[in-house]
Every structure is written in C-alpha cells, then in structure tokens.
Image: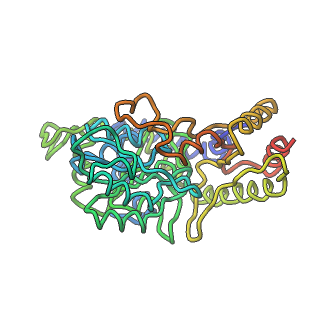
Amino acid sequence: MQFIDLAAQQKRIREKIDANINAVLEHGRYIMGPEVDELEETLGEFCGVRHAVSCASGTDALLLALMAHNVGPGDAILTSPFTFIATAEVISLLGATPVFVDVDPSTFNIDPQRIEPALSALKAGDASSHPLPGVSGLKAKGIIAVDLFGLPADYDKINAVAKENGLFVIEDAAQSFGAQYYGKRACSLASVACTSFFPAKPLGGYGDGGMCFTDDDNLADVMRSLRIHGKGGHKYDNVRIGINGRLDTLQAAILNAKFDIFPEEVSLRQEVAGRYNEMIAQGRSAEIVLKTPAIPSGYLSVWAQYSLLAKNEDQRSQIQNRLKDAGIPTAVYYPLPLHLQTAFGGLQYRNGDFPVSEDFSKRIFSLPMHPYLQANEQQRIVDVIYS
C-alpha cells in the first residue's frame, strides 16, 4: 500500500503529461517558458488573486515573501513551532528571529489567542508571560501562519491582530492549496501566500516548485525581481540582491496537466477523509481512543495529511508497528517541535515552553491519504489499528 499513490494519478493523465513535456522539448524554452505564464495565470485565477509568482520551491516562496517585506536582523517574525523547518528556517536565513506561538489544540494551527500575549511579552522584553527567544532588541514585524495538514488557520483573527499591531501576515499554504476558509480559497487569505509543489503536496509536480500569491502590485513586482537575481529592466540590470528562484518550465508543464483533474481530486479527498472519520468512530474501543481531525464550520481542508492523536507515545508506537507489520505505511508530522531542534538551539527555548506542540509531537501519526484510496483499503487500515 502506498502512503501517497502518485502512480494512480499519473495513469489517468499520462498522455497529457507526455504531450506537455514534449511541447517544452520542442520549443526549448526550459527557463521561464510559456507554460510558466500559463500556470501562474491559471492558479492565480483559481485562488482569486491578481498576481501569482512562481518560484523554485515552497521554501523559496516563503523566502521571497519575507525579502519583499525587507525582513532582516532585529526583526521578529511570529510563527508556529509545530510545522516543517522551512517556515522558520527562512526567517533565520535573513538574520531575523522566529518567535514561536503555540498551536490551537483542536486544529494544529497557530493559536490566535496566544499571538497578542506573545507581542506584549516581546514589547516588554518579559518572558514570564510568554516564552521568548534569548535575543535582545527584537521588534515584531510580521506573522507567518501555517495551514497545517491542509486546513487554513483562523485568518480573520490573525489578520485583525496583525492590523492592530502594524504587522504583515504571510499565509504558509504549502499544504493547503485547494482548501477554503469561509468561501475564500487558500492562498488568498493574507497579504501574501506561499505554496509548495513538492510531489507529495495536494498539487505536486515531479520535482521542487512553489508559488507566491498576492493582490499587492508592488509586492508582486518585487518578488518577480527577487526570484531572478534582483532583475530590473533586463537580464543584466540588477536593482536589488535576489536569488535564483525560478520555476522550471518542465515542472510548470507537468503542473498544468495535473491541475486539469485537481478540483476532482479535492472532492475525492473529502470522501476519503469522511470514510476515515466514520470507520475510526465505529472501531473505537476502550483500549484505543484516537482523536480524529477537527474541521471548524466554514472551513474546507484539502487533507494534505490525515493525522490522528494517540493516547500517548507508547500507544502510537504500538499502532504504527502493527500497521508496519501489515505492510501499511505511516508517518509522523512532526516528531520534534521547531523550538527544540538543534538548528534553533541558539534561541534558547526550553522543553515545556510550548506544551501543546510538545504533547502533539509525541502522539501524532498520519495514515495513507490520497484521492485514490479505496474504501476496502481504508477498512483494512482501521481493522489493523483496532486489532
């Protein structure tokens, strides 16, 4: 059994993928070819934003967004410790400092109620009311909210707090492209949004890729410049320090083919998740009680992952071992919160600073999840869990 079955998807659209790749081989514009423009226009329209700026990876998308906001040393960027390292890594790459805010116990996303206390503690330099990094002289500049596992964060509350405090908001939509929040699509929920086309994502290529989304004309122009070495009017006119962050034309061609069936796949993901919820509820036992994902009213998750919480770390290991013995893969996202990672040791965060994230990291595990997972396969998974 596959954790994510890319082969089943490819089988449906192989002819279109081959045709799109062959078109690129024919015209030979491997860098910034017409397929890139087509993808940007298609996805921008899908998300309901004016500008879609493709780039080389989801990490580069976050980096471009921060660079466009002139983030640098002395700046504090608030974000979640319960996510992939790229979210905070790009902050540190620019010399700024991640200030972590614990997650909502029901959604795994940054808890909006904890942002204001974090800002107050940062302004006062008082870590007694909220854990702070061991870096002095920081000033809050922005927030990166992560849409974990395909579920948007609570942007009404996050954007309101940001506006009150003069902060920008970046939507880290690496896992949520195709999701919805009160009728608005992911990647349109903050001043800038960033997504990833890593192969395992709901809309993934056959290599790395990413995209930034914004309605801000100036930010879009700056990010377009930054992704090509700070390009100005022509190739050898460099008006700012940038990066080599372009999306390959071949990846754009593949993504154009994949997007043809993407809306249908989003619907199929809802069916798969719904079956999991029902089957797990029916299989509940006194010994094994698993917490299934909570989707607030008005939200639509794209189900990048289907993640459960076991009672404790031992129970998680037992369940994972049973599934492994049955040939069923699982994964743990994420086994160690960012504030406890060696890479961020210089921030001097400690165990116990963000208890929700720390607790979840010991209990969470994810089951196979993709649009082509069949009911009989899911029933087998659930039967093994409760065996």
* Residue 252 pos. (x, y %): 43, 45
Taking the spot 59% from the left edge, 44% from the top edge, the residue there is: 359
In which image quadrant can residue 134 be found?
A: top left
Question: Which one is nearer the viewer's eye here, 337 or 238?
Answer: 337
Taking the spot 53% from the left edge, 35% from the top edge, the residue there is: 336
* Residue 251 pos. (x, y %): 45, 40
In which image quadrant can residue 294 be found?
A: bottom right
Would you place residue 45 above or below residue 205 in this image? below
Q: Quadrant of the C terminus?
A: top right
* Residue 335 pos. (x, y %): 57, 36
Residue 252 can be seen in this image? yes
* Residue 146 pos. (x, y %): 46, 51
Question: Which one is nearer the viewer's eye here, 141 or 298?
Answer: 141
Question: Which one is nearer the viewer's eye here, 55 or 327?
Answer: 327
Asked whether, in this view, residue 158 is left or right of residue 65, the answer is: right
Asked whether, in this view, residue 303 is left or right of residue 337, the answer is: right
Q: How is the image coloured?
A: rainbow
Q: Quadrant of the N terminus?
A: top right
Taking the spot 46% from the left edge, 38% from the top edge, the residue there is: 338
Would you place residue 294 above or below residue 253 in this image? below
Taking the spot 44% from the left edge, 61% from the top edge, the residue there is: 112
Residue at far front of view:
128
Residue 42 can be seen in this image? no
Asked whether, in this view, residue 370 is left or right of residue 200, the answer is: right
Question: Which one is nearer the viewer's eye here, 211 or 77?
Answer: 77
How many labels sit on residues?
A: 0
